[in-house]
Structures are given as structure tokens and as C-alpha cells.
Image (spheres, grey):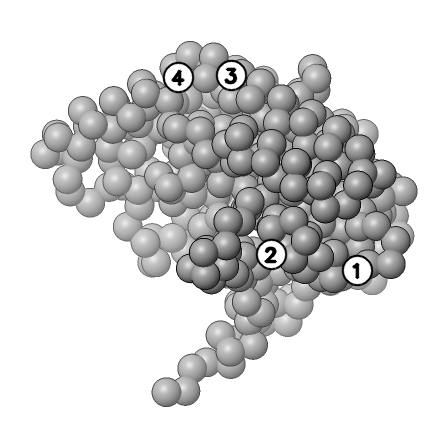
Amino acid sequence: MRVARRISDLPPYIFAEIDRRVEELRGQGVDVVDFGIGDPDLPTPSHIVERLREEAGNPENHRYPSYQGMLRFRRAAAEWMEGRFGVSLDPREEVLTLIGSKEGIAHLPWALLDPGDVALVPDPAYPVYRTSILLCGGTPVSLPLQEERGFLPDLGALEPATWEKARVLFLNYPNNPTAAVADAAFFEEVVHYAREYDVAVAHDLAYSEITYDGYRAMSILEIPGAMDTCVEFHSLSKTYNMTGWRIGFAVGNRELIAALGKLKTNIDSGVFNAVQLAGVAALEGSQDCVRQNCEVYRRRRDILVEGLRSVGWRVAKPSATLYVWMRVPSGHDSESFTRELLERARVVVAPGSAYGPSGEGYVRFSLTLPDERLEEGVRRIREAFS
């Protein structure tokens, strides 16, 4: 059966490929330590689960939800933004409930781009940015993220003609896959260019709460003028260990929120009300669970980084995200080193090249596996490569 070229031309989704390879090996009886995918192994906090249990039993929640999301959830999101970042939002017009932030990110280009329109995309980056642009007929233009610049794009290096053509700029700090962070000066530069050239900024802030050593991530909406041109995507997945629940929210410029909301009313029917009310419990409840999660990930980060350094590999200790981004040893590219780790240590990582050409020469380790499995992976690496 013939399928559309937009589907046949899509590259395999990296995480689906990692899943497939791990399952294939495990089916052969191979014990694999999987550092490949950033899916929290820690449970969703009990007070959130209990709220879902209560609300799922209420027949009023069994009907279609609001397309924009329950006002109760949007108010909780707005209040969380105010408390966390000092950003004031109108929950009716500047907050939109999402079926996970991935869904909103993937749909945004359909709301903003016509065929042939240019979108600026970091490289390396979460693959959904580029894929969603291609699916809607847009033209992605890469912004290389180089280690010597702290994995921040050089916005000033873009030709004015490219800025003139651009309709949207994707950003993500704290960053996946590089674990890089950005400061206010960088975001001020982003807002300057966005306002000068009338470019919408889509900032993916999925990892805002996964931080270490006193670092505190900021929202681009804290920058004066950002509300004129920016939309920011937030997820409950990583913050509260809710990847399977599929709930997040978009905030920011009301025209961008309205455009995305209009598209969604024609595609989906919203998030189950019981899940939204559990999301309210997450946002309004004690955040001690988040701090406890970060302490677990910090400890794992330290064990992993120490282990990688012990075999002579150069690796930075990240101050945010669930990832460690490492340059591969001399003589390897991303794919060959990924294969060698699998063959010699039975350890799976994500090759940096899967996130874009500028990811070549790196691999990404995730911290989302139980302590004993992470320690086993480190032990295997030491034995195989010391």
C-alpha cells in the first residue's frame, strides 16, 4: 500500500530505534544496561496518583474535556508560572493545555508555517522540532550548537536575509541532548532578534526543574518584551515522573496560543479531565518530591561522570537535565563508539549524530535508570575500557 512521501521520507525516530535494538538483544537473552532514553524510572508522587484515582471515579469527568483545557488546570499552570518565574499570565488566553509538550511542539509549525516557510532549528536538537517542520512543508535551517560556545547558537552569524525569511525559532534550555544551559543575556539577544525580524520563538522548557548544584533555570518569558513574540512549552513528564500521563501546557503570546489552540480544536479532543486535575495536584502541591528527584539524579550524575572520567574520557558535569553529553574517544565517530559500547560492555547510549550533524562526535547518557543498573553499567565500562 502506497503511503504519502512525507511519511516515507521521515527518518526513523531515534528513541523508537533504541527501543527496538534493546528489545532485540534482550530477546536473545543479552543483559543490556540502557542509558539510551530519558524516561524517569522513579514513580509518580503518591498524592498525584491518588488525585487521579479520585477524579477518575467521578462520572462528570467521563465526558469530552474542554479543547483549551480545564480552566482549573490553566489557572494552576498560570499560578505556578507566577510563583516559579514571576511571570504573570491570563489563564484564559495565554495558557493552553497540551497532551504532553511534545504534541504542542509538533503541532506549532502547522499553525505558523506555510509550505516553504523557513524555521530555525538548533543542531543537535530534540528530533521533533525538525520533523514537525518537514511534515508541514516548512524549510528547516540549522543553527549549529558548538561546544566552544557552550552549545548556544550564534544568532549574530545568521545573515539578515535568513532572519527576514524566518517565521519561527526553536530553542530548548536546559538543553536536550547537550545538557547546556542559557543565561538572561542569551535570552535577551533572542528576544531582540525575534522582535526585530518578527520571528516567533518556541522555547521548550521541559527540564526547568531538573537542576543541580544551586543552578536555577529561567523562563524566556522573564525577559522584557518576550510576551510579544514567544511561546514556551512546559511538561509535567520529567518534573513529576509523569511521562505516561501525557499532560503539559503552552504559555506566552496570546496570538500564538490562539493559533495553536485553533489547530488543536480540529485535531484532538483534549486531555482527560481526571489527568488534568491530577496535574493541578502536581502543580499546587508540595514540591518536595521534585527536590528529592533531583537529589537522586544528582547522585547518579556524579557516579556516572566519575566512572567515565576514570577510564580517561573527557566529560563535563551537567548542571541540569537528565543527561550527560560526552565527546567520543579519539578514533571513533558517534555510531562506531555506540556500537563498541554495546559490543564490549553491553551498554546502550544514544549516538549524538541522531540529533543532527553537529551532534556527530558525541554520545548521550541518560540518568533515568535505577541506581543499581547505572552502577552496573559504570562497572562494565570500567572493566571493558580501563
Which is more toward the observer, 112 or 306? 306
- The amino acid type found where label 4 is placed reads Glu
Q: In front: mark 1 or mark 2?
A: 1
x, y percent for residue 248: 43, 37
Image quadrant assignment for residue 301? top right
Helix, strand or loop status at disc 4: helix
Q: Which of marks 4 and 2 is nearer the N terminus?
A: 2
Tag 1 residue = 333
Tag 3 residue = 292
Question: Around disc 4, counting alpha carbons within 10 Å, would you say few (fewer than 14), some (14 to 19), or many (20 or more)?
Answer: some
x, y percent for residue 67: 31, 45
Q: In front: mark 2 or mark 3?
A: 3
Q: In front: mark 3 or mark 4?
A: 3
Which is more toward the observer, 196 or 142? 142
Helix, strand or loop status at disc 1: loop
Tag 4 residue = 284
In the picture, measured across the screen, residue 144 lies left or right of residue 36, that is: right
State yes or no: discs 4 and 2 in contact (Cβ < 8 Å). Answer: no
Helix, strand or loop status at disc 2: loop
- The amino acid type found where label 2 is placed reads Pro
In the picture, measured across the screen, residue 37 lies left or right of residue 47, that is: right
Q: Can residue 132 be seen in this view?
A: no
Q: In front: mark 4 or mark 2?
A: 2
Which is more toward the observer, 236 or 293? 293
Tag 2 residue = 127
Q: Which of marks 2 and 3 is nearer the N terminus?
A: 2
Which is more toward the observer, 88 or 342? 342
x, y percent for residue 295: 58, 18
Q: How far apart are marks 2 and 3 (CA)?
A: 29 Å
